[in-house]
Image: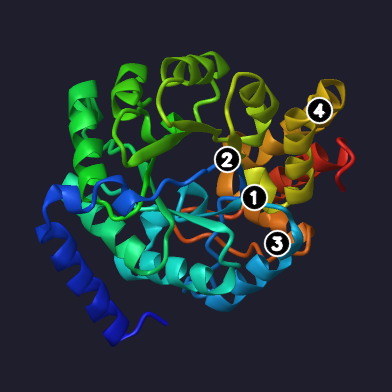
Amino acid sequence: MLGPRIWASVQQGLSRGLSRNVKGWASGEGRKVDIAGVYPPVTTPFTATAEVDYGKLEENLYKMGTIPFRGFVVQGSTGEFPFLTSRERLEVVSRVRQVIPKDKLLLAGSGCESTQATVEMTVSMAQVGADAAMVVTPCYFRGRMTSAALIHHYTKVADLSPIPVVLYSVPANTGLDLPVDAVVTLSQHPNIVGMKDSGGDVTRIGLIVHKTSKQDFQVLAGSAGFLMASYALGAVGGVCALANVLGAQVCQLERLCLTGQWEAAQKLQHRLIEPNSAVTRRFGIPGLKKTMDWFGYYGGPCRAPLQELSPAEEEALHMDFSSNGWL
């Protein structure tokens, strides 16, 4: 547990980080991180009384330990981060860091609505073991989230972050696409190393790869449903909710793409499309957690206001997996 002493250390780190000269945090203190590879965005397990179940979290991570993931994304959308307190968010990251091997990257979602809160959360995430921060677009005032506002936001966060920053665009949840022109500008920042794009527009992904090709900047697909197409257009990996249940298969798709076995990759990609849609756009996190229960992991309940699937939804979810040979 993130006890009082550790919490005090985090707070002290925050004070030091926010008072340092901007150059003190630039470029993640000189580190460059290669984020290429496949990552499951880890779910947050809850007990029947809606408390974070850290024991089940650790069990899931141990079970995933044999799969050749590049690392793990913690506190992304799949982790239900908007429903967690700040302390819970940090405790989850701390627990994951303690469990996973040191050679596995830990990308921690540190996005908040204000720039100040995002900087504070990012510094705190670094204190408890994150290797990089994945920062979602602020969206509550989306009408004013212009390219200029977003460039200012991410620049301030990257300037003050002790770890590299990964941009995160997920319009299905935020109603806001991080504009391509903003991405191109931000790709020039020495402490912004890449982007996770979950929008599903592969022409946009290809354009971003093309427009940032002169920078040390990497693009991750935000879903297994368009992973093959993203690799073909120059993406270097993916953060895929489906990898929580079909991790070995998503990594196999990665290998097929990287070795140029496009016909085999196409066949596998086709079989992943419906299950992927089921655990993302169609049934969301409740669908993913139900599927995890079927595949030997702990899914469990979501935190309110998210509700469990109806019997009809559960049946449809099962069909999406069984009809493609996964159940």
In space, the residues marked 2 and 1 are separated at their CA atoms by 24 Å
The residue wearing badge 1 is 288
- For the residue marked with disc 4, what is the amino acid? Ala
Label 3: how many Cα within 10 Å (few below 14, some 14–19, many 20+): many
In space, the residues marked 4 and 2 are separated at their CA atoms by 18 Å
Question: Which element carries disc 4, helix, strand or loop?
Answer: helix
- For the residue marked with disc 1, what is the amino acid? Leu
Corner quadrant of residue 232: top right
Residue 154 lies, with reference to residue 99, above or below; the image says above
Query: Which residue is the extreme one toward the front?
Result: 30
In space, the residues marked 3 and 4 are separated at their CA atoms by 22 Å
Label 1: how many Cα within 10 Å (few below 14, some 14–19, many 20+): many
Q: Is residue 310 visible?
A: no
Question: Which element carries disc 3, helix, strand or loop?
Answer: helix
Q: Are the two marked residues, 1 and 3, in contact with CB atoms closer than 8 angstroms?
A: no
In space, the residues marked 2 and 3 are separated at their CA atoms by 18 Å
- Quarter holding the N terminus is bottom left
Question: Which element carries disc 2, helix, strand or loop?
Answer: loop
Viewer-nearest of discs 1 and 3: 3
Q: Nearer the viewer, residue 80 or 71?
A: 71
Viewer-nearest of discs 2 and 1: 2
Task: Give me the disc on residue 36.
Answer: 2
Left or right of residue 244, residue 246 in this image:
right
The residue wearing badge 4 is 265
Residue 274 lies, with reference to residue 242, above or below; the image says above
In space, the residues marked 4 and 1 are separated at their CA atoms by 23 Å
Left or right of residue 183, residue 242 in this image:
right
- For the residue marked with disc 3, what is the amino acid? Met
Question: Which element carries disc 1, helix, strand or loop?
Answer: helix
Q: Nearer the viewer, residue 275 or 266?
A: 266
